[in-house]
Amino acid sequence: MNKFEPVIGLEIHIHLSTESKIFCSCSTKFGNSPNSLTCPICLGLPGVLPVLNKKAFHYAIKSSLALNCQVSESITFDRKNYYYPDLPKNYQISQYGTPVGRNGFLKIKNRSSNPVKINRVHMEEDAGKLIHDQNGKISFVDLNRTGIPLIEIVTEPDIYSPDEAYDFLQELKITILYLEIADCNMEEGSLRCDANISLRKAGDKKLGTKIELKNMNTFKGIRQALEYEIQRQTILLEEGEKVTHQTRLWDPLKQKTTSMRSKEDIHDYRYFPDPDLLTYEISNKMRNKFKDELPELPMAKRERFKKDYFLSEYDADLLVRDKFIASYFEETLKFHINPKAVCNFLTSDMVGVAHEKKIKLSNIKLTPKNCGKILNLVKEGLISIKTAKELLFDLLNYDIDPEKYIEEKNLKQMNETSEIKNVIETACKENSQAVTDYKNGKNSALKFLVGQVMRLTKGTANPAMVNKLLNEKLNKEEGK
Ligand code: ADP
Ligand code: ZN
Ligand code: MG
């Protein structure tokens, strides 16, 4: 048994996908030229007043509800004071005393009866971005990101392994995506996570000294950084040394963490209420309205799919991971009866073809009805599963009836013995060398001949029948 157990708490920042910033009307677009999306408010010039973005406020309430939080009856904003070149006001508007949500939880894989406790969900504005030149001599500042609305989600120290941290982040991301309030794009910094980790003697109640990990931009990186920290801290503790409170950075190339700053540098933020912003009420009526409007969330949907459609955990998870696929699945089931067949067709074939054709899933034109029809054609033996995949490739971008399409293109599966026998005759005549080779014991020649029959029938011949009939023919002649 392990002598030490890890305890992990996560702090996640997520950009809300509003058109404009949290306290001004500047655009939140990503990738514009530096400092082009700024105004006196987000630049923090004297004499300006912030006005709260209503959508950001509503999105924060929705996320709090989805994370099972108690929603505050009224909220206020506080100033978090610190100096940094990417923060023109020298304070960040955040929420300290009255966050939007408190005391929530999120169920994760393998821990559905013991969900991860969430301490709070609050709103704040993002800071700008510093860009350092390569030789480290000059730094630039881009204030386009200044004032982009964020929610910060803080978990309790209630996660007990790097795998659980990974599962939590996956579930959180999917849950937020289901709400359609953020894109959670980690590459663009729209979802960022700091992880806190301490070790304690197995069985102890008291928490150990925590290390804060920053600079991780993939969930896999977070899991690796946590695994590395467990090893590092275990060695320290086994040698009788102390872990000191630090912020450390994850280096994905070196696969290790290095110290960025120690506790001495930690700021006292001197939080105080922002006098420029009002108190915002969240009435019961408003809270209930948002609660009623919540979509079915991923964990509930997964459980329902397992129960109603007899799917495995794995299949249910593949479908639910994408809200569009999950609903497309249920729509298709109105036209084709077999859930497992629809699931496989969507999660492997359709996702694969869409990826290959570079079509966003939500933009495909093939309707669930036509998708169901394709699967019905397979079930009735009118087309092979291979043809079904080809149809998907051809029709993904169109609203075309697959039944008509296979008529027009002659794609119906050839199931007639006499028809297939005719093609086999032709294939054998055209490839007499292969026939001779087979008779001389070269077994691979049979495969080649099957291939020729499939080619001549444009892939429509029933492959099992081709195999059987060709075998019969060649071995009969052999025995003559
Ligand atoms: P701070 O005041 O240093 O910011 P907080 O109490 O606000 O600390 O917690 C910040 C994050 O660190 C939370 O996600 C919390 O769960 C986590 N955390 C706090 N103490 C520990 C600990 N001893 N070990 C692991 N995580 C911790
Ligand atoms: Zn602005
Ligand atoms: Mg904190």
Image (tube, rainbow, N blue to C red):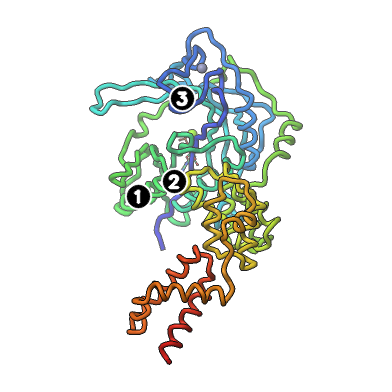
What residue would you read off at disc 1?
228
Q: Which amino acid does label 1 sit on?
A: Tyr
Q: Is mark 2 on a helix, strand or loop?
A: helix
Q: What residue type is labelled 3?
A: Arg
- N-terminal label among 3 and 1: 3
- N-terminal label among 3 and 2: 3
Q: Do the residues labelled 1 and 2 touch (CB within 8 Å)?
A: no
Q: Does the residue labelled 1 lie within 8 Å of ligand 1?
A: no
Residue 138 coordinates in the image, percent (x, y): 27, 21
What residue would you read off at disc 2?
219
- N-terminal label among 1 and 2: 2
Q: Do the residues labelled 3 and 1 touch (CB within 8 Å)?
A: no
Residue 410 coordinates in the image, percent (x, y): 57, 60
Identify the residue at the far bottom of this view: 480
Q: Does the residue labelled 3 lie within 8 Å of ligand 2?
A: no
Q: Image quadrant for the C terminus?
A: bottom left
Local crowd size for mark 1, using a 10 Å CA cut-off: few (<14), some (14–19), many (≥20): some
Q: How far apart are marks 1 and 2 (CA)?
A: 14 Å
Q: In this view, does 141 lie to the left or right of 203?
A: left
Badge number at residue 145: 3
Of marks 1 and 2, the one in the foreground: 2
Residue 347 coordinates in the image, percent (x, y): 54, 55
Q: Is mark 3 on a helix, strand or loop?
A: loop
Q: What residue type is labelled 2?
A: Phe
Q: Is mark 1 on a helix, strand or loop?
A: helix
Kindly indicate the quadrant of the structure image that contains residue 181. Answer: top right
On the question of residue 434 being in view, the answer is: yes
Q: How far apart are marks 3 and 2 (CA)?
A: 23 Å
